[in-house]
Each structure stands twice: as C-alpha cells, then as structure tokens.
Image (cartoon, rainbow, N blue to C red):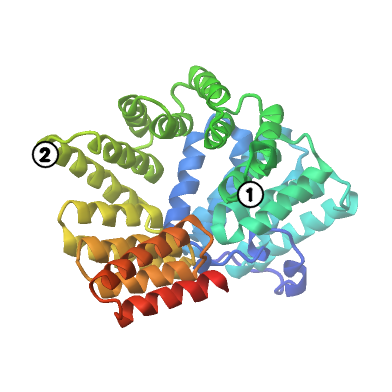
Amino acid sequence: MQNMSCTRDEPPYTDLEELECHFTWDLKKEDTNITDLLTRLEQHRDLYLGQKSGTAHTHNSLAYVKYLLGFYEEALTNLHKSVEITNDCYGDNCDERLIVTYGNFAWLHFHLKQYAECKSYLDKLKKITEQKPPVPTSVLYTDVVGEKAWALFKFSRKYYDRAIECFRKALELEPERGDWNAGYAIVLYRTETKCTSPEDSSAIQQLRRAIETNPDNDEIKLLLALKLAEFKLFDEAEDLVEKALDKSPDSPHVIRYVGKFLRNYGKSVDRSIGLLKRALDATPNSAFIHHQLALCYKKKKEQFREHTESQRLCHLSISHFEKAVTLKAGFIVAKLQLATLYGEDGQIDRADEMFQTALFSAKEKNEGLQNLYLYYGEFQQYRKRCQQLAIKYYKDCLMMGPDTPDGKKGAKNLTKIANKRLSYNTNDTIALGIQEFIEQVTSG
C-alpha cells in the first residue's frame, strides 16, 4: 500500500494509548483462530445487510481483523463503511457514535505512518470529548462500552468474562438498550453450565429480558427455547420455536436453531434435516449448519439396523463433519465427533489422526480437553484395543474434574477396567493402582 505524504510529525503515542478502540482493547491474534473469526464476521455482515444498525460494529471488527492479516486497504474500507452506516442510522451529526471508529482510524493511519491523517482523527476525538466528556452517565460512554463488549464476545471465547463485565456496565447505564441485552443474553447462554432449575438460570432470566427489549429477534427466542428444553419445559419451548419459524421462515440463523431443537427435542429428525438444508442454501459456508446436519444424519443412522442405509447415513454425517472442521479449523467438538465417527466406520488411522488434531487444538485453546480425554480413552479401549492408553486418558479426564459428568464417566470406565482385571487376578497391580488413583482424586 502506498503511504500518503506526511505533513506533520508523529503524534504522541500516549494520545493513541488513551483511545477506546480495537487497537487498545488487548485483542490478541494468538487468542483466536483468525481465519474462523474473519469468516464469522463476514457471514454476519452479509446476513444483516438490510439491517444497517447492526453492522456498523461488525465493520469495525472486520477492519481490525483485516489489519491483523495485513490487508490495510480493506481495513480502511471497512472503517469508511462503518462511518457510512452510522451516518445513515443517526444522521450526519453523529460523531459521538463514532468514537471507536475514529480511534481505529487514528491507529491504522499511525501504523501506516500516515501521521497527518492520524492527527486529524485525534483532533476529531478531542473535539467530541470536549463537547461531551465520556463520563459514566452519558450515552456516548455506553456506546463505547457496549461496542467493546461485542468486540470481546466475537473475538475469542477466552474473552467471554470480559465481555460479560462490559455488557453489565453498559446495561447499568442503558437498561432498555436492545442490542446490549441481546449480547449479554447470548454470552450467558454460551457460558452457563451448572443450574438445578430454570429459576436459578441467569441465562434464562436474561434471555427473557432480551426478548422484552428485542421483540422481533427470533434468534433470541430460539435460544430461550433450547434453554427451557434443558429443564423439560417443552410446552413453552415449542411455542417459541413455532412463533420464531412462522415469523422468520427464511432466516438461516433461525432455521439452524430450529433444526437443533427438533433434533434434540422434537420427534422428526427428517424435518430438522429439511430445514437445515434450506438454511445451507442461503449460507453454504456455515460451519454451524454443516455441524448440525452431521449430527442429524448421525442420529438418523442410529435408528437404522440395515447395514447399507446405516453406512450411507454414516458417510453423509462424516462429509458434513469434514466440511464443518474445514470451514472452522478451531471447531474442537466437531473434530472430536468426526474422529469418533471415523472410528465407528472402521477408519482407525484417520480417526487417530483427527483425535490428535483435536487434542492439539484443545491444548492450544485450553478448551474441551476433559471431554476429549474421555472420548479418546474410549477410542483407545474399544477401537484400538489399547488398554494402557485408555487408562492414561481416562486418568487425565478424571484429574480435570471428578465431579463433572465427563469426570464421573472417566471414573466409571476406570472402575470397569479395574474390576475386570481383578476378576482374573485379585492381586493385579495395575487394577489396584487404578483403584488407589480414583480414591485419591475423588476424595481430595
């Protein structure tokens, strides 16, 4: 990219460090799969082209990702698009809504050594804050905190806790703001794990709140339906599903969650497959939809005993799992499920290779390791007939948390191995060692 001529000296670095924008929010390239992130942001941009108010933030995040990838012209184009959309939504006098965008402009021009342009955006920001200081009671401040929340949420699962904190801050200032309520609900839905009842579920409470402030957001309704179904509240869940599908029959985001609901809780896997195929026509590069289709075919395969049909469905499932992990390299759970299915199909070497790939990704992201250890242990035990490695991975699984469902399953599998060995030899040192290990981990 050609640098524009500089007419001024380099601006003070401290002025840039004080800005609120993607360049100062500690969004690290190594904390995400940058290719996956780019694909997700571009899909979000394309899906919501007609809803401009929701895409200005997306273009800001896209600009930062393009910068990280070295596509500086495209980064600038996205920032200009963010300005254009904001102007369309709020009118020409909307500079206070562009604090993050102007900050990104300043940093990008600084990195390109275009110091005159950098200084012009610093001047714009100084003028905005002088006219309306970003104190915690202003709408301006809420916009910045809210956009930061969305940026953290979209960038990496590692930032979910920071995103939750930012959404909470934004909602303290503007409790009726629909987009902040929706973002907060989605991140709670994705992070909540231990709840004994719907009354104890912060995600359910916030999803209901998000629907109040976003009555036309059918995706939120489906997330609530999925959450309610976990507690067997099927009547309300099914009502939400039907209403969402009636209102948004062609929305890929809606259809994918309807498909997931029907597969998990409905009576028709075929209907789920039909809906997901329709969604795939609109978004052929959606790893999520390919993953859901793979799970549908896998579930349908389990309903057939006839070998030819079962194998056909198995291969359909495998093809969609393969597409999902190709489109989203960091899709650990899909890699794990694909590896397991390879094993069921007798493709032992491919299964082992995929497990190793999933293991590398899980360790790199520190995500999904316990579940992976459990399934890899079962693969070693039942497919490769390697009890030694099975014991190793079950132990790894148990050590990561004896009270979790995976941890309890790991302990159960270890106990079965020990009991079987002891039935042949009551002094089997490996079996006695397993029992001692389980006792130490579960009692400590």
| Residue 216 percent across, percent down from the top left | 62, 24
Task: Give the SS element for disc 1.
Answer: helix
| Residue 10 percent across, percent down from the top left | 70, 74
Seen in the image, is 117 located left or right of residue 239? right
Quickly name the residue at label 2: 307
Tell me which residue sits at (47%, 37%) in the image. 46
Quickly name the residue at label 1: 150
What amino acid type should be assigned to the residue bearing mark 1?
A: Trp
Tell me which residue sits at (28%, 44%) in the image. 320
What amino acid type should be assigned to the residue bearing mark 2?
A: His
Seen in the image, is 20 located left or right of residue 81? right
Image vertical order of residue 188 relative to residue 351, above or below: above
Q: Which label belongs to residue 291?
A: none
Sort mark 2 into few (<14), some (14-19) or many (20+) by Cα contacts within 10 Å.
few
Seen in the image, is 308 located left or right of residue 389? left
Sort mark 1 into few (<14), some (14-19) or many (20+) by Cα contacts within 10 Å.
many
Judged by depth in the image, the label closer to the viewer, 2 or 1, is 2
Tell me which residue sits at (25%, 38%) in the image. 302
144 and 17: which is toward the camera: 144
Mark 2–mark 1 contact, CB under 8 Å? no
327 and 231: which is toward the camera: 231
- What is the C-alpha distance between the residues marked 2 and 1? 48 Å
263 and 95: which is toward the camera: 263
